[in-house]
Image (cartoon, rainbow, N blue to C red):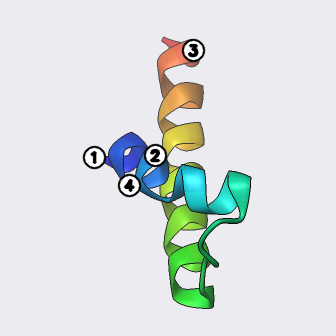
């Protein structure tokens, strides 16, 4: 879910074809943090 949400805004954010608004940016950052937290948990196991 988190990765899907990040990939949905990837092209707009990376290529700048479509502006990413503040709401989308905040959402993307929340999803990125959740993925990092999950990765840390998995790596500690």
Residue at coordinates 57% horizontally, 16% vertically from top-left?
44
**Left or right, residue 40 beside residue 3:** right
In this picture, residue 33 sits left or right of residue 7 = right
Choose mark 2 or mark 3, whichever is in front. 2
Give the class, few, some or many, for how many residues have Cα within 10 Å of label 4's Cα (few <14, many ≥20): some
For the residues labelled 2 and 3, say whether their Cβ atoms are less than 8 Å apart. Answer: no
Give me the residue at 66% from left, 61% from top.
13
Instruction: Say which mark, if any, is on residue 19.
Output: none
Foreground pick, 5 / 41: 5
The residue that mark 2 highlights is 7
Label 3: element kind: helix
Give the residue pinned by disc 4: 5
User: Mark 4 near mark 2, Cβ–Cβ under 8 Å?
Assistant: yes
State the image coordinates of residue 16 (x, y, percent, origin top left).
71, 64
Disc 3: which residue: 43
Position above or below: 40 against 22: above
CB atoms at circles 4 and 1 under 8 Å apart? yes
| 2 with respect to 20 (left or right) | left
Judging by the rendered image, the residue that carries numbered circle 1 is 1
Residue at the spot 50% in from the left edge and 59% down from the top edge: 9
Q: Nearer the viewer, mark 1 or mark 2?
A: 2
Is 22 placed above or below 45 here?
below
Between the C-alphas of marks 4 and 3, the distance is 23 Å
């Amino acid at each position: 879910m988190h990765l899907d949400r990040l990939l949905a805004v990837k092209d707009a954010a990376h290529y700048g074809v479509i502006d990413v608004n503040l709401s989308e940016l905040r959402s993307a950052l929340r999803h990125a943090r959740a993925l990092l937290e999950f990765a840390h948990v998995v790596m500690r196991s």
